[in-house]
Image (cartoon, rainbow, N blue to C red):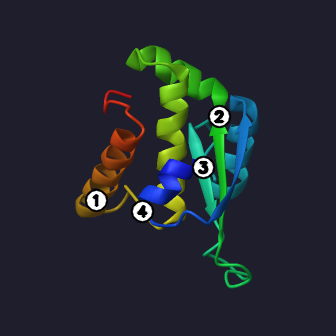
């Protein structure tokens, strides 16, 4: 995680990471986003919401379904560790305000940043 945060020029920031199963992430997805299905990663940025100015070094929470990550690793023919690193990068980028929905340009910016950070971790884009 340190390499990712250094790549985002924020080495002193803090992130909470929670690894859960599909049932738990589906419940979070339903409760917060109204989606009745599991997903691979959900981010909760501290920069949004009522108490966003309490501590600028706390970026927020990244929740990853280890169960979905394992399935996606098998489908992508990569290691579980590489998939978890990719999902962590993806989740952290959401904490920094990157988004892949709603605009092709925003999606391209996020994808380029993902590729840059994957390269820093010596992981190929094939995840």
Residue drawn at 24 percent across, 58 percent down: 104
Q: How far apart are marks 2 and 3 (CA)?
A: 9 Å
User: Along the polypeptide, which appears first: circle 2 or circle 3?
Assistant: 3
The secondary element bearing badge 2 is classed as: strand
The reply to whether discs 3 and 1 touch (Cβ–Cβ < 8 Å) is no
Q: Do the residues labelled 2 and 1 touch (CB within 8 Å)?
A: no
What is the spatial separation of the Cα atoms under label 2 and label 1, in whole angstroms? 25 Å
Give the structural element (helix, strand or loop) at label 3: strand
Which numbered circle lies on residue 65? 2
State the SS at label 4.
loop
Label at residue 98: 4
Label 1: how many Cα within 10 Å (few below 14, some 14–19, many 20+):
few
Q: Position of residue 85 (x, y in %)?
A: 51, 36
* Distance in Å between CA atoms under marks 3 and 4: 13 Å
Q: Residues within 10 Å of mark 2 (few under 14, many from 20)?
A: many
| Vertical placement of residue 51 versus 46, above or below | below
Residue 6 at x, y percent in the picture? 48, 58
- Residue 52 in view: yes
Image height of 98 relative to 90, above or below: below
Viewer-proximal residue, 111 or 85?
Answer: 85
Residue 42 percent across, percent down from the top left: 60, 49
Mark number, residue 117: none
């Amino acid at each position: 995680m340190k390499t990712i945060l250094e790549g985002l020029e924020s080495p002193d920031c803090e992130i909470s990471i929670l690894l859960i199963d599909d049932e738990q992430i589906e419940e979070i997805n339903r409760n917060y986003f109204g989606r009745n299905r599991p997903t691979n990663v959900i981010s909760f940025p501290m920069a949004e919401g009522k108490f966003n100015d309490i501590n600028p070094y706390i970026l927020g929470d990244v929740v990853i379904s280890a169960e979905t990550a394992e399935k996606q690793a098998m489908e992508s023919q990569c290691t579980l560790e590489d998939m978890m690193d990719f999902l962590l990068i993806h989740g952290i980028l959401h904490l920094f305000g990157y988004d892949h929905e709603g605009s092709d340009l925003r999606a391209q910016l996020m994808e380029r940043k993902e590729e840059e950070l994957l390269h820093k971790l010596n992981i190929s884009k094939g995840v």
